[in-house]
Amino acid sequence: KAGVTQTPRYLIKTRGQQVTLSCSPISGHRSVSWYQQTPGQGLQFLFEYFSETQRNKGNFPGRFSGRQFSNSRSEMNVSTLELGDSALYLCASSPGGREYTDTQYFGPGTRLTVL
Amino acid sequence: QQPVQSPQAVILREGEDAVINCSSSKALYSVHWYRQKHGEAPVFLMILLKGGEQKGHDKISASFNEKKQQSSLYLTASQLSYSGTYFCGTETGTASKLTFGTGTRLQVTL
């Protein structure tokens, strides 16, 4: 099976702009989670989508949003970019449907730099 | 709230053992362990569900003490390939979000 893919891999934006990142999960996986990774904060949970519905949400401002399509592909959007949004954004997919969070299969990430 | 990992960093010689701890201030439903090598995505190691079980494969094992809200990852006879940053992720309810610790950087040298 193909792994989790994320596009684009690298992105450079300026403050105030908005950005959309895309994630294609492993075939058959219905859950997609997004994480922000920075050197100081480690892996921080943004949100999880399961069967097109947001199931869990982290403590990020409303500028961060996401959605999931019927084919389980997911996008996340960040509006009004700030310098502090510079990070590696990781997407992880899992089969979903269990009573506990299942194994997360991470994609390679999108490196976002905000200037 | 983020689980607390200790130590923050450790350097080992090949063949030595290491223990990485993960503590939470909340009751835990599950604990997950991942390893991330530099420039790569995190890779799953194991999940432990509440019930105080111990799991392991090869020379890496983990325990989960539900009462103490702690988990420990044990690496025995470390190999160079064990180098990387280890993250524990904790879940406090059924299908709730996974909250990761800030990581433990492990370096194995010859």
Image (spheres, grey):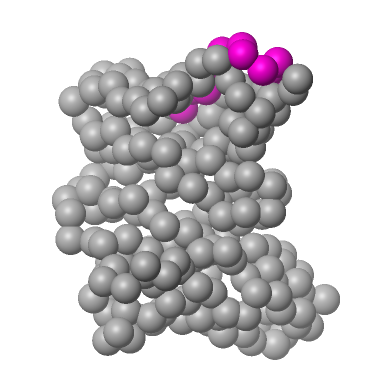
Residue in the image at 47% along x and 41% along y: B34
Whether B10 is drawn above or below A32: the answer is above
Closest to the observer, A73 or A34: A73
Residue in the image at 37% along x and 28% along y: B57
Name which quarter of the figure residue B65 lies in.
top left
Main SS of the magenta part reads strand
- Region of the chain picked out in magenta, as a range: B11-22
Q: Is residue A81 left or right of residue B86?
A: right
Whether A102 is drawn above or below A62: the answer is above
Name which quarter of the figure residue B9 lies in.
top right
Residue A62 in the image, given as x and y percentages of width and height: 49, 75
Image quarter where the C terminus of chain A lies is bottom right
Closest to the observer, B106 or A85: B106
Residue B101 in the image, given as x and y percentages of width and height: 52, 39
Residue in the image at 41% along x and 30% along y: B24
Closest to the observer, B82 or A82: B82
Asked if the stretch drawn in magenta spans residue B34, the answer is: no
Q: Is residue A23 left or right of residue B64?
A: right
Quick one: which residue is furthest to the right in this view?
Answer: A115
